[in-house]
Image (spheres, rainbow, N blue to C red):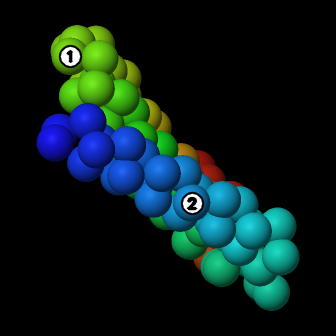
Amino acid sequence: MLDIALWTSMALVVAALLLNVYRLTIGPDMPDRILALDTMYVNSIALIVLMGLWLNTKTYFESALLIAMLGFISTVAVCKYLLRGDIIE
């Protein structure tokens, strides 16, 4: 039963990633693209955690935490650049 749930959730997360790629390329303006990129970070974290559950190892959880930190910092940096024109004041 767990295998079916993992495969189903992995398929849905991959579908969400594909929809995010579509929004990233076709997005009408820059805030939509930034939001799609941020959502791709969250979906990739979910996919990595699901892979860690499927393979029963802890290293995937550590990599998911690292991607979460880098995703947050990069989203803040891009938003700050979009609003002010520079990252470092």
Residue that protrudes farthest toward the left in the picture = 1
Q: Nearer the viewer, residue 89 or 48?
A: 48
Residue drawn at point x = 37 percent, y = 52 percent: 8
58 w.r.t. 37: above or below:
above
If the image is split into quadrants, where does the C terminus sit? Answer: bottom right
* Res 76 seen here: no
Q: Secondary structure at mark 1?
A: loop
Q: Residue at x 57, y 60 (%)?
A: 15
In the rendered structure, the answer to whether residue 26 lies left or right of residue 77 reads right
Residue 46, percent across and down?
35, 46
Which residue occupies 17% across, 39% down?
2
- From where the camera sits, is residue 61 visible? yes
Q: Amino acid at mark 1?
A: Asn
Q: Nearer the viewer, residue 33 or 12?
A: 12
Question: Which residue is most to the bottom?
Answer: 28
Q: In the rendering, at what x and y percent does residue 73 appear?
A: 45, 46
- Given contact means CB atoms under 8 Å apart, are the residues at marks 1 and 2 in contact? no
- Measure how far apart labels 1 and 2 are at the Cα level: 23 Å
42 up-or-down from 81: above or below: above
Mark 2 sits on what residue?
15
Q: Quadrant of residue 31?
A: bottom right
- Helix, strand, or loop for circle 2? helix
| Disc with the residue nearer the chain's start (1 vs 2) | 2
**Above or below: residue 37 compared with residue 88:** below
Residue designated by label 1: 56
Is 25 or 1 nearer to us in this picture? Answer: 1
